[in-house]
Amino acid sequence: MIARVFHRMVNPAVIAALAAMLAIFSLDSARAQPPGPVPATLAPIQLTPERRQLIGVKFATVERRDVSEHLETTGSIEPDEKLQSYVQTRFSGWIQKVFANQTWQSVRKGQPLFTIYSPDLVSTEHEYLLALKEQSRVQSSDIEDVADGANSLVESAAERLRQWNVAPSEIARLKRERTVGGAVAIDSPMTGVISDRAAQPNMYVQPETRLFTIIDLSRVWIYAAVFQDQIGKLRIGDPAIVTVDAYPGEKFEGRVDFIQPQIDPMTRTAKVRCEFVNRKGMLMPGMFARVAIHLPLGVQVVIPESGVIRTGLRNVAFVDRGDGYLTPTEVELGPRVGADQIVLKGLKPGDRIVGSANFLIDSESQLQAAAGAYVPPPPGIAANSESPVAAENQSAAKVEMTTDPSPPKRGSNKLRIALHDASGKPIANAKVSITFFMAAMPAMGMAAMRAQVAASDQGDGAYSVSLDLPSGGTWQVTIVATKEGRAIATNQFNVSVTGPMSM
């Protein structure tokens, strides 16, 4: 229907007027649509150097470089479970003397911890001494295999003592002195500190009784709490640095040792275990620590974080094509690294993009898309110097606007319209409609705005009206002049309004 109407019309001025009216109708229709998950349409735009300076546009270059991040969190120091040992006996008996009688006492490997008397152990020691005696008696026997049998008995008795965890020094004493000592000493299996002690003099113990817990603090673990959105950046072996309040200025170097495969549903964090060498014993279990983990992310394509518009449905960057020509490009983003943003798809190294004032560029692009800014004008219609969509017949009437103040500001403004025919003669008694429109900006939570006024005839082709603009930013202005029910002039262009944006 619309196509047939355009086909029958021959007056270029009428064509321009209808094009402007259809643009306004399409903008109002889009505004009336209920909100939904449909992304705003974007179109290429072209800005003059003056406009770019007024908006505050700055450019950035897409780079490909080595990227790393520092993750800072907190954690607590705990003993290394792999350097922990329990002391138990392999036989029943009564403890006689306890040498390691303090919790957190330091002990060395092989140091006696306590002595114990066990009837079973004494019986085995007697068997060992009898085997030694028999071995000495038949040592010079001429009977075949007699000496070998005696040696086998000695070794069998000695092996039972070793299986009961009798110290080699005690077995050597038995062999040397040939007397049963009664109580035997139980030595520490490792060097460390006693974190738990249950052994007491005259205490009866059985094999399942845990008498000491010894931990080696030469290496400790720190469990750092990492939020789930950071877990994907971590790798086993990533370097970590820890600081504690007890030692200002001291830094302890370690590495990520284990990432716990579970998220705490209350804090939404996972425990990341870092391993640290603690030769001086400065890192103590239970200490609160600050952990900084270095996250090398490799060579990535990066842009400034301010160089992308996030609409909630897609991410858009504006690429500079030269001569102020900017095209919107949808990009796929990776993690944010400080003030930079990793780009996975959509841009390549060397591209020049808009690095600031993106929300204004986004508004301009939506405006141009809604008005069909880059649709070629009909034959006989020339593009306006400010916007490709503003068209008029060079032989028809011309309408122009000036503002007070200039440029216009947020708040009250005086609009002055000059209407002349093709020869420059003023046109009086016309109806002049002025419409200001700003597209919605979802990234800023702003709805579309529209203001329309009718200018009054001041004579000699001059028309004026006051208009209150609710927001600074880029507005699209459409002026339609009609006389005797016929459109005689139209103009459409963009105006930058000073003042803060309306939020």
Image (cartoon, helix red, strand yellow):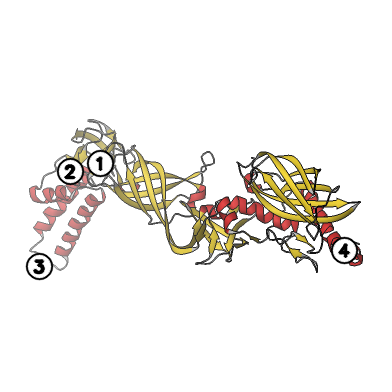
Q: Residue type at mark 1?
A: Met
Whichever of labels 4 and 3 marks the residue nearer the N terminus, that label is: 4
Q: Which residue is mark 3?
A: 142
- The span from disc 3 to disc 1 (Cα, nearest Å) is 66 Å
Q: Quadrant of residue 465?
A: top right
Dot 1 alpha-carbon crowd within 10 angstroms: few under 14, some 14 to 19, many 20 or more? few
Q: Which residue is mark 4?
A: 11
Q: Nearer the viewer, residue 332 or 278?
A: 332
Q: Residue type at mark 4?
A: Asn
Whichever of labels 4 and 2 marks the residue nearer the N terminus, that label is: 4
Q: How many marks?
A: 4
Q: Which residue is mark 1?
A: 282
Q: Position of residue 381 (x, y in %)?
A: 78, 65
Q: Which residue is mark 2?
A: 111
Q: Nearer the viewer, residue 153 or 46?
A: 46
* For residue 283, side relative to residue 419 (left or right): left
Looking at the rendered image, the disc whose residue lies closer to the viewer, 3 or 2, is: 2
Q: Quadrant of the N terminus?
A: bottom right
* For residue 29, side relative to residue 313 (left or right): right
Q: Quadrant of residue 111?
A: top left
The kind of secondary structure element at disc 2 is loop
Whichever of labels 4 and 1 marks the residue nearer the N terminus, that label is: 4
Pointers 3 and 1 in contact (C-beta within 8 Å): no
- The span from disc 4 to disc 3 (Cα, nearest Å) is 139 Å
